Image (spheres, grey):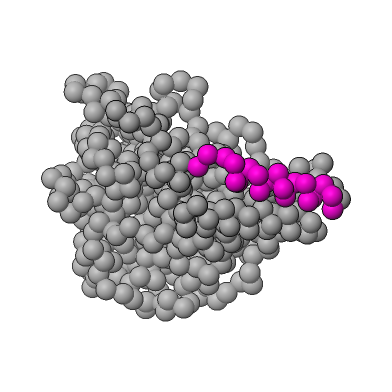
Amino acid sequence: MTLPVLRNIALLGALATLSATAAEAPAGPHTQVAGIEASWLTPPARPNLDFAADGLPARAAVLPALDYVAAAQIADMSRRPIQMATGSNLSEISSNWVAATFYVGAARLARVTQNRDVLRFLTATAEHYNYSLRGARAERTLLNADEVAIGDLYQELYARRGQRGAIMPLQQRLDFMLPHLEREQDTASLVWWWCDALFMAPPVLARHTSLTGDPRYLRAMDREWRRTAARLWVEQDRLFLRDERFKDKDHLGAGGKPVYWARGNGWVMGGLARTLESMPASFEGRAFYTDIFRKMASRVIELQQHDGLWRSDLNDPKNFPEAETSGSGFFVYALAWGINHGLLDRATYLPAVTRGWAALNRHILPNGLVGAAQKTGDRPVPTRPDDVGPYATGAYLLAGLEVMDLHGPVQALPEPAIARDDDATILATTPQPPPPKTVVGEAEKARREQEMRATRALAYDPAQLNTPARNKQ
């Protein structure tokens, strides 16, 4: 056998041994769901979250905060039963956009943290949903950007491990979307008719081109993004309306001004950052995106409030005076990202970032979750100090990672491919199901091990021939 095949067999054997060992270990006292690991249920000790508003915090001070908040979110999600239908889930492990936004931030944290439980949790989540996407009930929902958001997690695992199955269902979904995104004639209805969609789907399409080398995904993304911007971007205000309803007089704010939803515009800026990370520097339409990003940034810093946060209605902060972190988190992320990638002037924007970062940390609740997060919806509403949502945690993690990177040099765009995991990392971060309950006693365990060895030895493996899984013409 070839060396790669032998290495894969050894890795599978080690995983089987690890699985058997884990199955024999006693469950943690708080374990509620099969597959939830005891270590996920207890966050680390709360670190110092008191960051100065007028200075850049040390990298060594920010990373423990990110580890703590990510672990708290994982613990909260892991304590809740996993629902069969995931569309309206707000707190559980899920495949919807609510959870997927947390996975985006957690996946990037997993690149730098020493806590392997983060990647282990993400891998287990992807395995639980078999790398699939919601929306199969109708062709309209197959195009829903919210259902594509979890594709970022699958792409991240594929980029780290090269396991083709991790992006097969995603690629099938994106291939279905292509002709609709590329339609020749404009239509009365948009595919991405609400501005939140620009965070959910476009970065996944752009990254798919980067991962596969196929330019169709980026071209299709560009076509529909421009259609959405033509309807929702307001040039004179340098912000996005949430959707076209907010153009009419029945959807104006209390002061008669247009409503500009903070989280909606945060979605757009965060989505722009993630899309530009994968967009080639030579892409013909790239300046369109960097121009909108800079215009939004220049407006956003004008709207930051005295406490370092932004209000739910950017255009009418007095009508929604409460602190709000979900939109604010994305603004801190986007502004710091813009500095780190040379799109924004450091001297101009850094004070807004440090004020915003300090303010976000003042709203970390005693349980480690990000408080003052506006609930799910489509417009500004009052927010309570104890309101939480996994999407706010995802924004917080993205913001903190960019704050850490402010200590380094300006980063090039597009970002380089991330390094592949070695076998030891894959082993340590891939939870395995326990043996069947019928495997009891030493004799049955030995028989099971022989069965697994035979499976590994006798099953056809395409990697042995290093050929694509399709018929040659």
Q: Residue 83 sits in which quadrant?
A: top right
Q: Residue furthest front?
A: 1
Q: Quadrant of residue 344?
A: bottom left
Query: Residue at (44%, 26%) from the top-left corner?
Result: 141
Residue most toward the right?
A: 441
Residue at the (60%, 46%) spot, across then down = 456
Asked if residue 103 can be seen in this view, the reply is: yes
Relative to the observer, which residue lies in front, 155 or 222? Answer: 155
Q: Is residue 455 magenta?
A: yes
Q: Is residue 102 left or right of residue 117?
A: left
Residue drawn where x is 21% and y is 55% of the image: 294
Q: Quadrant of the C terminus?
A: top left
Q: Position of residue 229 (x, y in %)?
A: 23, 38
| Residue range corresponding to the magenta coloring | 442-461
Q: In the rendered view, does 256 fall on the left or right side of 111? A: left
**470 and 37: which is toward the camera:** 470
Instruction: Look at the magenta stretch and give its main secondary structure.
Output: helix
Residue 225 screen position, x and y as percent? 25, 37
Q: Is residue 250 left or right of residue 426?
A: left
The picture places residue 22, in percent across and down from the top left corner, at 73, 57
